[in-house]
């Protein structure tokens, strides 16, 4: 058994930012099921929102609420928007660079935003942010990072969390005792056949929450992104960022006709595409980049451009086939405004958690910001605590013989997650039909 003050499960933006925001006299362990850079945070393309000035507050708040069908927790939205400038300052302090002109930020726009308020780093904003956070975390003496280490259970009793059970690459299991456990395990795309997420990010923490009776919220609120590159190959779907449409690209059906306003909220655009595909019996629709100046395509979207060309579709010359795919999880483990779950000494941050910011549907480029804001709040809450409960007999709280067959455990967790999404969706449909 190892002991840490805090164990953080996940090395995406949320987990790393939480670790960096904790006091440096805390002994912290961050684990990742995959490589340390195998997180969806590295994949984020479009950017991260920031409140430009007070004049934009009402509009930013309204855009977030409208995209979320007004089911968002207003307090969380307010906290996120009001914290955004400080978060960007923190990121710059960690060495993150955003696009600037004459020393001033350049802002772009995505669907359902009334104003340009998104900071970006070409079309690899997530990689820029998360690689810098990872580099800073590696420099900190109080932070230990372990790759290919999978959380398989929590060590808990009477609704208090005392740590986790982990399995290494060879399936060897051990326990980690910690005063505080922070879940930063990302979303659940791995349980869907077509998703923009990494396959290993599959809602493990949600299954454990179900198993240990920790409250979940809105598990059926799963976002389908309108535009991923159409392919018949298996594996992760390649995203074509909404900022491409924000900069002018348009959708066309099989006859070359436009059929929807491309800058509506994601759920609306996805539904319009799926309806058109059904009507015309097609496997995809087309994304036409031609309204965007060539220089803008090459400079703002170099990664997307390269990927499309490699797939045989040069956006400078031809339309690109696109299809909706699972992308983001608005629901999750219920947390309060300080990212506390309903179990003592257990926090959840980032896409695993549901703090209510996104309501029923996430506004583009709000998720990196939300992850960072509430990861920092978790760190502040943990730092302010003077004492923690200790397990009287930690070693005997779990039976380690129960974790021998790791693949079966993971399969079981996936089935639990899929079952919960379906159950919630059915319940909601019944409720809404009344
Ligand atoms: C293609 C793509 C593009 C996106 N573009 C944008 C964008 O432009 N702007 C924006 O705001 N958002 C964007 N998003 C969403 C955003 O990237 C994510 O919501 C956010 O990065 C989630 O961060 P996270 O730290 O919560 O989780 P992640 O970054 O997904 O990290 C999850 C971590 O948990 C670990 N993990 C999972 N399960 C276990 C386990 N059982 N044991 C141990 N470790 C585990 C993983 O290995 C990983 O380290 C995009 C997402 C994708 C997929």
Image (cartoon, rainbow, N blue to C red):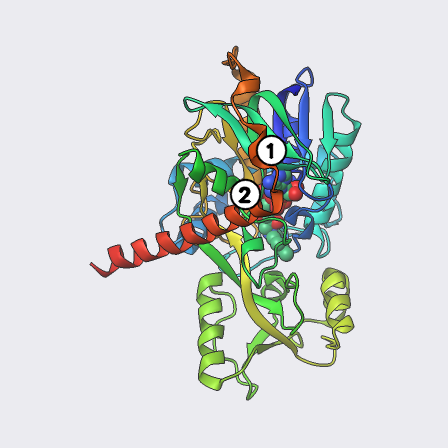
What percent of the width, then of the height, locates residue 284? 57, 77
Is 412 placed left or right of 430 in the picture? right
Identify which residue, 35 or 264, lies in the foreground.
35
Is 22 placed left or right of 340 in the picture? right
Residue at coordinates 71% horizontally, 75% vertically from top-left? 315
Quadrant, the N terminus: top right
What percent of the width, then of the height, locates residue 96? 73, 40
Q: How dense is the environment of label 2, judged by Cα within 10 Å: few (below 14), some, or many (20 and up)?
A: many
- In this view of the protein, can residue 374 be seen by the observer? yes
What is the count of numbered marks? 2
Residue underneath mark 2: 204
Quadrant, the C terminus: bottom left
Residue at coordinates 62% horizontally, 61% vertically from top-left? 241
Q: Nearer the viewer, mark 1 or mark 2?
A: 2
How far is mark 1 from mark 2, CA to CA? 31 Å
Where, by quadrant of the figure, is residue 320 drawn? bottom right
Residue at coordinates 70% horizontally, 44% vertically from top-left? 34
Is 356 placed left or right of 145 in the picture? left
Q: Which residue lies furthest to the left in this view?
A: 434
What percent of the width, then of the height, locates residue 229? 64, 70
Cβ atoms under marks 1 and 2 closer than 8 Å: no
Q: How dense is the environment of label 1, judged by Cα within 10 Å: few (below 14), some, or many (20 and up)?
A: few
Q: Which residue lies furthest to the front in this view?
A: 401
What percent of the width, then of the height, locates residue 302? 76, 63
Looking at the rendered structure, the secondary structure element under dot 1 is helix
Looking at the rendered structure, the secondary structure element under dot 2 is helix
Q: Sequence order check: which comes first, mark 1 or mark 2?
A: 1
Residue underneath mark 1: 86
Q: In this picture, is 86 found above or below 62?
A: above
The residue at label 2 has a CB less than 8 Å from ligand 1: yes
Residue at coordinates 66% horizontally, 79% vertically from top-left? 319
- In this view of the protein, can residue 105 be seen by the observer? no
């Amino acid at each position: 058994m190892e002991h840490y003050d805090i164990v953080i499960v996940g090395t995406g933006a949320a987990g790393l930012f939480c670790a960096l925001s904790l006091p440096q006299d805390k002994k912290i362990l961050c684990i990742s099921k995959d490589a340390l850079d195998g997180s969806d945070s590295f994949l984020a393309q479009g950017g991260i929102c920031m409140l430009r000035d007070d004049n934009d507050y009402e509009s930013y708040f309204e855009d977030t609420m409208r995209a979320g069908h007004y089911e968002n927790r207003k307090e969380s939205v307010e906290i996120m928007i009001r914290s955004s400038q400080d978060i960007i300052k923190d990121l710059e302090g960690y060495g993150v660079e955003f696009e600037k002109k004459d020393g001033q930020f350049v802002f772009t726009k995505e669907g359902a935003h009334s104003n340009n308020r998104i900071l970006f780093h070409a079309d690899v904003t997530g990689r820029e942010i998360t690689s810098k956070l990872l580099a800073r975390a590696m420099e900190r003496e109080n932070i230990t990072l372990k790759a290919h280490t999978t959380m398989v259970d929590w060590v808990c009793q009477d609704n208090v969390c005392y740590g986790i059970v982990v399995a290494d690459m060879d399936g060897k299991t051990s326990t980690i005792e910690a005063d505080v456990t922070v879940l930063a395990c990302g979303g659940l795309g791995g349980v869907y056949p077509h998703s923009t997420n990494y396959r290993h990010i599959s809602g493990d923490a949600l299954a454990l929450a179900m198993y240990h009776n920790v409250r979940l919220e809105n598990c059926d609120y799963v976002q389908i992104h309108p535009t991923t590159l159409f392919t018949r190959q298996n594996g992760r779907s390649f995203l074509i960022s909404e900022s491409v449409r924000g900069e002018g690209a348009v959708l066309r059906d099989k006859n070359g006709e436009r059929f929807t306003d491309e800058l509506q909220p994601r759920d609306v655009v996805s539904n319009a595409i799926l309806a058109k595909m059904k009507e015309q019996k097609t496997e995809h629709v087309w994304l036409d980049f031609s309204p965007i100046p060539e220089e803008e395509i090459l400079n703002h979207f170099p990664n997307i451009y390269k990927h499309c060309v490699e797939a045989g579709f040069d956006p400078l010359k031809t339309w690109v086939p696109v299809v909706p795919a699972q992308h983001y999880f608005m629901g999750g483990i219920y947390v309060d405004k300080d990212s506390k779950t309903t179990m003592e000494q257990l926090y959840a941050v980032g896409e695993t958690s549901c703090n209510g910011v996104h309501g029923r549907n996430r506004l583009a480029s709000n998720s990196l910001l939300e992850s960072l804001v509430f990861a920092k709040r978790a760190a502040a809450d943990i730092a302010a605590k003077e004492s923690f409960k200790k397990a009287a007999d930690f070693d005997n709280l779990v039976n380690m013989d129960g974790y021998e067959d790791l693949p079966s455990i993971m399969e079981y967790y996936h089935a639990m997650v899929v079952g919960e999404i379906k159950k919630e969706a059915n319940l909601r449909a019944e409720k809404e039909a009344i």
